Structures are given as structure tokens and as C-alpha cells.
């Protein structure tokens, strides 16, 4: 009796055809072009979801630990910052400015006029 059952005689192809005929509505046939379009949309959607999750999970600590915050531009800026904060040159510049101000003060006290240097002229213009 089991040998004559339609379940034993029904092949996979026949079953798929019967299921396909049960489908109704506006369906798109699968062609290489439609499949490629669907696959591209699916991958784009998946990439967008991963990017959104990454952005959601991105905290300051995780970015610091991963090292993603460093890039070539920031390393160039760091080298520029090192030059800007060179303490020896900063001390020399400060000492030079103090000496000029002291000379100006002494000249003023003794009534001698000293022509202002370029730095002093620029500072006076900025203050005025």
C-alpha cells in the first residue's frame, strides 16, 4: 500500500511544479539580470546595516583602542604641533621679547628714543 502512495511516486521536480502553480499575484521571473539586481540590492542593504551598527557601536574608547582615529593627516599635524610647541625656541623668543621691552623701558626712563623693532610695531598695531 505504501508503494502506491502518491508521496513515494512524487518526484522533487513534480512537487516544485505543483507548488509553483499555487503561487498567485504579480511575480517577477528569475533571470540572470533580475537575480544580479536583487543580489546587489541585498548586499547594499547588508553593508548599510553593518555601517549603521558600526556607527552605533563607535565610542571614544573603542576608537582609541582600535587606533582608527590616527591617519596620515593626523600624523602630519602632530609633527607640525611638535614644531609649534618647541619649548627651547619658545623660551628664546620669550627672552628676546623681554629684553626688548627692558631696553624700551630703560630708554624711556633716560629719555632716549629707540626705533621700535618689527615685532614691537606689529604688536602696537594689533593693540591699537
Image (spheres, rainbow, N blue to C red):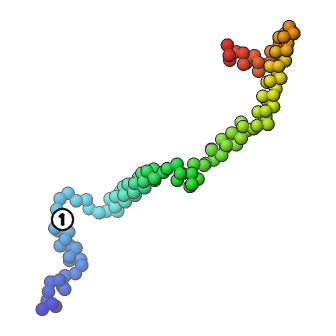
Seen at 22% across and 73% down, the residue is 16
| Residue 40 position by quadrant | bottom left
Which quarter shows the N terminus?
bottom left
In the picture as drawn, the residue positioned furthest to the top comes out as 111
Q: Residue 72: image x %, image y %?
A: 63, 47
Vertically, is 1 above or below 97? below
Vertically, is 80 above or below 123? below
Asked whether 42 or 101 is in front, the reply is 101
Mark 1 lies on a secondary structure that is loop
User: Circle 1: is it few (<14), some (14-19), or many (20+) Cα within 10 Å?
Assistant: few
Seen at 25% across and 59% down, the residue is 28
| Residue 113 position by quadrant | top right
Seen at 52% across and 53% down, the residue is 62
Q: How many marks?
A: 1
Residue highlighted by disc 1: 23
- Asked whether the viewer can see residue 70, the reply is yes
Asked whether 89 or 105 is in front, the reply is 105
Q: Residue 116: image x %, image y %?
A: 80, 15
Q: Residue 12: image x %, image y %?
A: 24, 78
Vertically, is 75 above or below 108? below
- Asked whether the viewer can see residue 44, the reply is no
Vertically, is 127 above or below 52? above
Q: Residue 27: image x %, image y %?
A: 22, 59
Seen at 85% across and 15% down, the residue is 106
Amino acid at each position: 500500500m505504501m508503494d502506491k502512495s502518491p508521496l513515494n511516486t512524487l518526484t522533487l521536480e513534480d512537487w516544485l511544479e505543483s507548488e509553483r502553480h499555487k503561487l498567485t499575484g504579480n511575480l517577477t521571473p528569475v533571470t540572470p539580470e533580475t537575480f544580479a539586481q536583487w543580489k546587489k540590492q541585498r548586499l547594499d542593504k547588508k553593508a548599510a546595516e553593518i555601517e549603521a551598527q558600526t556607527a552605533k557601536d563607535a565610542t571614544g574608547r573603542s576608537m582609541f583602542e582600535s587606533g582608527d582615529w590616527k591617519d596620515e593627516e593626523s600624523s602630519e599635524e602632530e609633527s607640525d604641533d611638535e614644531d609649534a610647541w618647541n619649548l627651547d625656541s619658545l623660551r628664546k623668543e620669550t627672552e628676546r621679547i623681554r629684553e626688548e621691552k627692558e631696553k624700551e623701558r630703560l630708554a624711556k626712563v633716560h629719555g632716549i628714543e629707540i626705533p621700535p623693532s618689527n615685532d614691537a610695531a606689529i604688536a602696537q598695531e594689533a593693540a591699537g
